[in-house]
Image (tube, grey):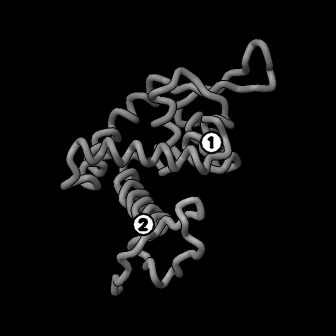
C-alpha cells in the first residue's frame, strides 16, 4: 500500500479548512480507526489462541479482568467495561457462574439489580491468564518507551471521551 499523504489529516473548519481529505489521500495507514481496529483484532486473535488452554474465551477474560479490579458491578456496567453486548455478557456470566468463577447477587435495596463479583476460584484463574495478557501487551508495545505510552494513553482517553455513550 503506497503512502503518499503528508498533509493535514484533521482538517477542522475552526482551523480554516473548508474541505475534507479523501480516504485515498490519507491512506489506511494514516486513518486511526483502521489502525485501531487492526490492532485490536490481532490482539483478540492472539489472546483467544492463548486462552484456549484455560477454557476461557475472550469475553470471559474481559469479564474476569474487570471483576479482578472491581468489588462488584452490574451486568450493564460489566458489558460496558468489557466492551461486550449485554446478551453476550449474560451468556458469558452464565458460563462463568457454572465454572464457579463469579457470583451474582441481588442488591438488597433493589432486587431487580444483580451485582456481579469474582470468586476466589475466578481470581485464581485470572491470575493464571494475567501473565499471558501482560506478555502480549508488552509485545504490542515493544519499542515504545514509558513516556510515549503515557501520551498514547492520554490521547486514547480524549478519543474515548469524544465518542462514548456512557459516563463510565
Residue located at (58% from left, 48% from top): 162
- Answer left or right for 26 relative to 136: right
Q: Are marks 1 and 2 in contact (CB under 8 Å)?
A: no
Q: Quadrant of residue 41?
A: bottom left
Q: Quadrant of the N terminus?
A: bottom left
Q: Which residue sits furthest top?
A: 108
Q: Quadrant of the C terminus?
A: top right
Q: Quadrant of residue 108?
A: top right
Q: Which mark is residue 35?
A: 2
- Image vertical order of residue 32 relative to residue 152, above or below: below
Asked whether 53 or 68 is in front, the reply is: 68
- Image vertical order of residue 36 relative to residue 117, above or below: below
Q: Which residue sits furthest front?
A: 16
Asked whether 98 or 86 is in front, the reply is: 86
From the viewer's perspective, is the residue at label 1 or at label 2 nearer?
2
State the SS at label 1.
Answer: helix
Asked whether 60 or 17 is in front, the reply is: 17
State the SS at label 2.
Answer: helix
Q: Which mark is residue 17?
A: none
**Horizontal and vertical percent position of residue 138:** 25, 48
Q: Which residue is mark 1?
A: 79
**Horizontal and vertical percent position of residue 23:** 51, 80
Q: CA distance from mark 1 to mark 2?
A: 24 Å
Residue located at (52% from left, 77% from top): 21
**Horizontal and vertical percent position of residue 97:** 59, 34
- Image vertical order of residue 63 relative to residue 138, above or below: above
**Horizontal and vertical percent position of residue 60:** 51, 44
Amino acid at each position: 500500500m503506497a503512502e503518499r499523504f503528508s498533509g493535514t489529516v484533521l482538517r477542522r473548519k475552526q482551523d480554516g479548512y473548508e474541505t475534507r481529505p479523501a480516504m485515498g489521500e490519507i491512506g489506511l495507514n494514516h486513518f486511526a480507526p483502521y489502525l485501531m481496529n487492526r490492532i485490536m483484532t490481532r490482539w483478540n486473535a492472539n489472546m483467544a489462541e492463548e486462552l484456549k488452554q484455560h477454557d476461557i474465551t475472550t469475553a470471559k477474560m474481559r469479564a474476569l479482568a474487570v471483576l479482578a479490579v472491581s468489588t462488584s458491578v452490574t451486568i450493564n456496567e460489566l458489558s460496558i467495561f468489557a466492551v461486550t453486548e449485554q446478551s453476550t455478557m449474560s451468556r458469558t456470566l452464565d458460563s462463568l457462574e457454572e465454572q464457579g468463577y463469579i457470583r451474582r447477587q441481588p442488591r438488597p435495596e433493589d432486587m431487580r439489580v444483580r451485582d456481579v463479583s469474582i470468586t476466589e476460584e475466578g481470581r485464581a484463574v485470572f491470575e493464571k491468564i494475567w501473565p499471558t495478557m501482560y506478555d502480549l501487551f508488552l509485545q504490542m508495545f515493544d519499542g515504545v518507551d514509558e513516556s510515549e505510552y503515557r501520551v498514547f494513553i492520554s490521547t486514547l482517553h480524549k478519543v474515548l471521551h469524544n465518542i462514548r455513550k456512557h459516563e463510565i
